[in-house]
Image (spheres, rainbow, N blue to C red):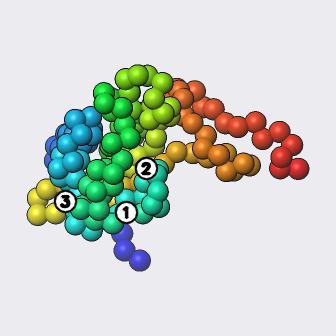
Amino acid sequence: MSTYTNTTSAFSTAQDEAEIRRLIEAWSAAVSARDLDGIAANYQPDTLLFDAIPPYKTIGRDAIRQAWANCLPFFPEQFRLERRDLTIQVAGDTAFAHFLIHFLPVPADDPCGQTWMRVTSGFRRIQGAWKVLHEHVSVPFNPMNSQVWFIRNPDVVDIPDYGNACT
């Protein structure tokens, strides 16, 4: 059994968190700008993406870029990505971030803006630069009917009324 000791100073951890925050902000801006190269810029050639839309997994920067290329034409002409509740944890050369994202479309009732999605990204420092190695985007579902359970307001913990379904 090994024990991990974090020898990273608080100063370098703060710098790493700031750099990862900058990468996530740049990714968000790239999505809003439909900039495919910017979207894929910080993924590794073998990054694994578990996305909220099919297919259930996408492997590699080029495939992730292509998935966005296939998806963006279905977005309205105008939208921006809103992000909130960003939390970043750094331990040496590994970091995790989790946050919520929401598309703000014009017109506001476009289907892409109906829910918040949960994102978790795993980073590794490779040759001095932080890169995404794994990303997971999801929307909860109601296990009683297998339907997506939209997150309409992330400030309200909302769950299905399971009633007597489990008895």
Is residue 20 visible in the rendered image? The answer is no
The quadrant holding residue 162 is top right
Q: Earlier in the sequence, mark 1 or mark 2?
A: 1
The quadrant holding residue 55 is bottom left
- SS for dot 3: strand
User: Which residue is painted at 48% across and 24% down in the image?
Assistant: 109
User: Which residue is painted at 20% across and 42% down in the image?
Assistant: 35
Q: Residue furthest bottom?
A: 1
The residue indicated by pointer 1 is: 58
Q: Gap in Å between the C-alphas at discs 1 and 2? A: 12 Å
Specify the amino acid type for callout 3: Arg
Question: Label 3: how many residues lie within 10 Å, few (<14), some (14-19) or many (20+)?
Answer: some
Observer-nearest of 36 and 162: 36
- Closer to the camera: disc 3 or disc 2? 2
Q: Does residue 19 appear left or right of residue 155 in this picture?
A: left
Specify the amino acid type for callout 2: Val
Relative image position of residue 125 (x, y in whole percent): 19, 59
- Closer to the camera: disc 1 or disc 2? 1
The residue indicated by pointer 3 is: 125
Q: Gap in Å between the C-alphas at discs 1 and 3? A: 21 Å
Is residue 152 visible in the rendered image? The answer is yes
- Closer to the camera: disc 1 or disc 3? 1
Relative image position of residue 40 (x, y in whole percent): 22, 53
Observer-nearest of 121 and 74: 74
Please report contact status of discs 1 and 2: CB closer than 8 Å, yes or no.
Answer: no
Specify the amino acid type for callout 1: Thr
User: Which residue is painted at 76% across and 36% down in the image?
Assistant: 161
Relative image position of residue 97 (x, y in whole percent): 34, 47
The quadrant holding residue 103 is top left
